[in-house]
Amino acid sequence: MYSVQCTVYRYGRGITQITNYSVQCTVYRKILRLRLRMTYTYFWEGFVISKICRRYVWVLVFRILLLASAICLYIVGAQKPDFTVIDKHGFGRLLNAVVWLSLVAGMLFRLFPNRRIAMGARKHYACSYGAVLHKEKGSNKTSAARKGLHKGAFFCGVAWVLFNSAIFFVLSMFGALTPSSAMLIMLAYSVFDIICILFFCPFQLLFMRNRCCVTCRIYNWDYLMMCTPLILFPSAFSVSLLLLSAAVVVRWEIALRRRPHYFIEETNEKLRCEKCEERFCRTQITSKGGRTK
């Protein structure tokens, strides 16, 4: 009732003092609209995803379309998605160009601090660091968190090498280990990369045990992991992507060695739930963040 009274007072008189029927109906409609807006905000605020989350959804759709195009080209097309052939013509060459440009653009965004990428990918920059006041220096909790970062990353790296080695071995047994199959695997990895961010991440569940993607230790490993199948087929396409993805990882690891306090929420308050503006925890199954906040 207080909100109703405030709304009525905004028009300079009490609703009971309004004698004009049309004016009275207008006031009632404005009050009803206000209450509907308040009800919508109360019930649906927790389900609205952030701007950066919507951006990742569009990236997921784009990568799915690229993967579907490559699969169609591989199955029914006369041309295979072969990135080792420089003088290729037709749709295969266009697909290679679009894939290369999209990956290079994404990696260049990672090499420079900007707000177009998620906090998890730019937390190693000084602009994404917020010092925690009254923190206990050298505390056991902080030291354990730093050790956990390296331990989880080591197991993720080993698991990724073994997983890809098994895939390469099986494909080579059937004679299917070709540049075209490597392209398909890379595009499939690119799709699963966004799925890990938005919905379900096996690395987080099995090895890292971190709260959410914002605190992920291996967030910027994604492009190098995507380009792993290209190692077997050196070309201008594959070497350029591998070198640039390696540069992203090297930049990330150097920052981690020099400023490890940027990477954990115990020493960087911008990684905490109350400072988060992205809210990937609303869509991710494996997240341990504030899903209901």
Image (spheres, rainbow, N blue to C red):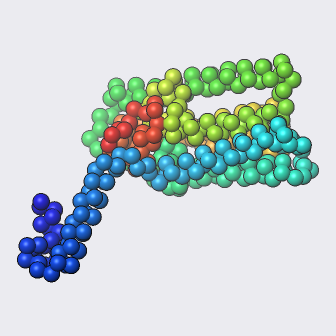
Residue 226 x/y as whole percent: 68, 37
Instruction: From the viewer's side, name the closer residue of 2 and 181.
Output: 2
Above or below for 157 versus 220: above
Position of residue 233 in the picture relative to residue 69 (left or right): right
* Residue farthest along the bottom direction in this orientation: 20
Above or below for 112 versus 251: below
Using the rendered image of the protein, determine whether residue 260 is visible from the camera's viewpoint: no
Residue 134 x/y as whole percent: 26, 41
* Residue farthest along the right direction in this orientation: 87
* Residue farthest along the left direction in this orientation: 17
Position of residue 160 in the picture relative to residue 57 (left or right): right
Using the rendered image of the protein, determine whether residue 284 is visible from the camera's viewpoint: yes
Please give the name of the residue rendered at 31% of the width and 48% of the height, measured from the top-left corner.
43
Please give the name of the residue rendered at 51% of the width and 51% of the height, measured from the top-left corner.
54
Please give the name of the residue rendered at 49% of the width and 26% of the height, measured from the top-left corner.
205
Quadrant occupied by the C terminus? top left
How many marks on residues? 0
Instruction: From the viewer's side, name the closer residue of 8 and 217.
Output: 8
Instruction: From the viewer's side, name the closer residue of 160 and 122.
Output: 160
Above or below for 61 versus 159: below
Q: Report which quarter residue 180 is drawn in.
A: top right
Residue 107 x/y as whole percent: 64, 48
Residue 26 x/y as whole percent: 23, 74
Quadrant occupied by the N terminus? bottom left
Position of residue 24 in the picture relative to residue 192 (left or right): left
Please give the name of the residue rendered at 35% of the width and 27% of the height, measured from the top-left corner.
141
